[in-house]
Image (cartoon, grey):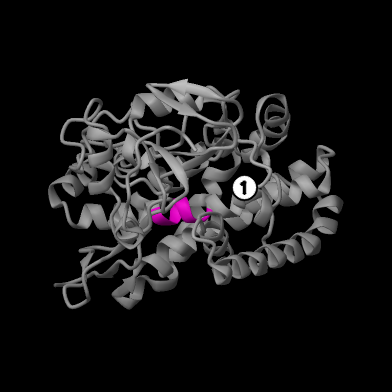
Amino acid sequence: MSSAPTVNIDPAAFWANPYPTLARMRQSTPICFVPELGATLITRRDDIHTCEKNVAVFSSDQPDGLMNVLMGRNMMRKDAEEHRQERFVYYPAISPRKVEQVWATLFEDLTDTVLTNFQQSGSADLVPHYATAVSGEALKAITGLTQVWFQDLDAWSQAMIDGVANYTNDPSVASRCHSATAAIDAAISERLPQVKQVPDYSLLSVMTESGMPEEMVRANIKLTISGGQNEPRDAIAGAIWALLTHSDQLALAVSGKVSWLQVFEEYCRWIAPIGMSPRRIATEHSYEGVTFEPEDRVFFMFNSANRDEKHFDAPDTFDVTRDTTASLTFGAGPHFCAGAAASRSLVGNVALPKLFERLDGLRLDAMAPPVEFGGWAFRGPLTVPTIWGQS
């Protein structure tokens, strides 16, 4: 165990809203051991930015980590040359250039279709009907699992992210995760012969065509589903809620004074859809007066880094005019999120502007219960009930 001071938390309260606790940690115990999570948390932006690049110490290679155990060993849990080689195969399928050339038009088309399916209803919970659907349909195309329902992808993603964040070792959570990964394996097995016969731009096809061993292909498809569904889903739904509860900020976006992409960037700084990334200490190391021992578990708290008072004035305020370049929404260093360009395109360039263009008078349903958020490793609104049209 590291020599960091111990800080206890209430897991339920931390899940409901981690930000007050994280603010206290940044102020008084920026590196602290939390027994309830069995990990040392690093909460300040500059410390995370420095440590994340030191992969010789803060290693992503976690042989006994929950992600490896539950999903298979993917590139997110590899370092150095092993990580680089796998990323070299994976990245071109969703690079900024490929997003612009291939996926951006598809994102436009599928978002229009999703909106058409419910636009005439005049009311909807935008989490399942819009955010989940748009994210899932995009992910079906990108992964190559075009035969499944977007609801399946969402359920599988949720089961996996619950599983990899199951630090209290709840057996029911682990069981749901195993069921999800088995279903993904079955879907991959169904599609593999087809993409081998007719290759396309999907990750399943690109990785298979490269000669990547099948077990690596399967592990990386599961990785893509685990983060590629919930992050854009929660960013879409959360940013919509943020704009509907901050009319001045919505006016700036609608008028074109700020871009919709900037709305996305600021929302993800303010409420990080992916709030944490785990690491394993590979060798004894001292940093900022704390001694880390081999095999210690460390959590880089991106959600805390993105509200670090040293870098952001009034960090608890949603301000779409803010300079967000210091944020760590997609991480830093060699493990910077490979899907960042796809996420920015889908959410910032397509999903947000199209919704407000097509649903005239969109507003929260005043008759519905208040919107609640949940999660600290992954965070988003549980519902966003809305109505539109004449008031």
Q: Is residue 24 visible?
A: yes
Q: Amino acid at mark 1?
A: Gly
Q: Which residues are magenta?
A: 229-234
Quadrant of the image occupied by residue 234: bottom left
Pick the residue in front: 377 or 110: 377
Q: Residue 202 at what x, y percent from top left?
A: 69, 47
Q: Residue 5 at what x, y percent from top left?
A: 34, 36
Give the residue displayed 60% in from the left and 52% down from the top. Answer: 66
Give the position of the C terminus as an image quadrant.
bottom left
Pick the residue in front: 103 or 72: 72
Give the residue displayed 28% in from the left and 39% down from the top. Answer: 25
Pick the residue in front: 135 or 21: 21
Residue 134 included in the magenta stretch of the image: no
Q: Is residue 344 left or right of residue 174?
A: left
Q: Is residue 104 left or right of residue 128?
A: right
Position of 330 relative to 163 (above/below): above
Position of 90 relative to 124 (above/below): above
Give the residue displayed 71% in from the left and 51% down from the top. Answer: 72
Q: Residue 56 at what x, y percent from top left?
A: 60, 23
Give the residue displayed 64% in from the left and 66% down from the top. Answer: 180
Q: Residues within 10 Å of mark 1 (few under 14, many from 20)?
A: some
Chief secondary structure of the magenta span? helix
Which residue carries the number 1 mark? Answer: 65
Q: Residue 378 at what x, y percent from top left?
A: 43, 53
Task: Please give the count of numbered marks on the rendered protein.
Answer: 1
Pick the residue in front: 246 or 258: 246
